[in-house]
Image (cartoon, grey):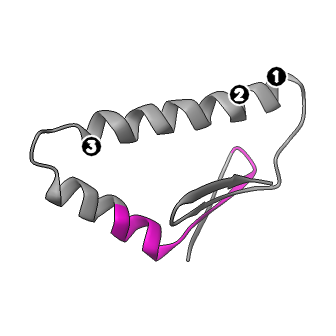
Amino acid sequence: MINFNIFGIKFLVSIGFMGVICLMLYIDRVGLMLPTILAVFLHEMGHLITLLVFKVKPQRVELKVGAIVIV
């Protein structure tokens, strides 16, 4: 598990998550995975921004295989 902090929020990224992302990018033949990954990233950033606007600081964000968990 890879751990790092951004703006005081702890991020945990599993090795499996990184492996799945790399695999999806590797087997993508039509070029749709990168825009899809960017859309998911922007969607989740919207959740984080909304929490910060309402002054609710998440304890951690976990990036796991098949799930992104905001605690």
**Residue 53's disc number:** 1
Q: Position of residue 57 (x, y in %)?
A: 85, 41
Magenta highlight on residue 10: yes
**Residue 33's disc number:** 3
Indicate the amino acid at tag 3: Met
Q: Are marks 2 and 3 in contact (CB under 8 Å)?
A: no
Q: Position of residue 1 (x, y in %)?
A: 55, 77
Magenta highlight on residue 8: yes
* Viewer-side label of 2, 3: 3
Q: Position of residue 41 (x, y in %)?
A: 49, 38
Indicate the amino acid at tag 2: Ile
Residue 26, image quadrant = bottom left
Name the foreground residue: 35 vs 54: 35
Q: Are marks 2 and 1 in contact (CB under 8 Å)?
A: yes
x 9%, y 47%: residue: 29
Instruction: From this view, report whether residue 28 is shown above or below residue 23.
Output: above
Name the foreground residue: 13 vs 67: 67
Residue at mark 2 to residue at mark 3: CA–CA distance: 24 Å
* In this rendering, position of residue 54 left or right of residue 34: right
Residue 16, image quadrant = bottom left
**Residue 49's disc number:** 2
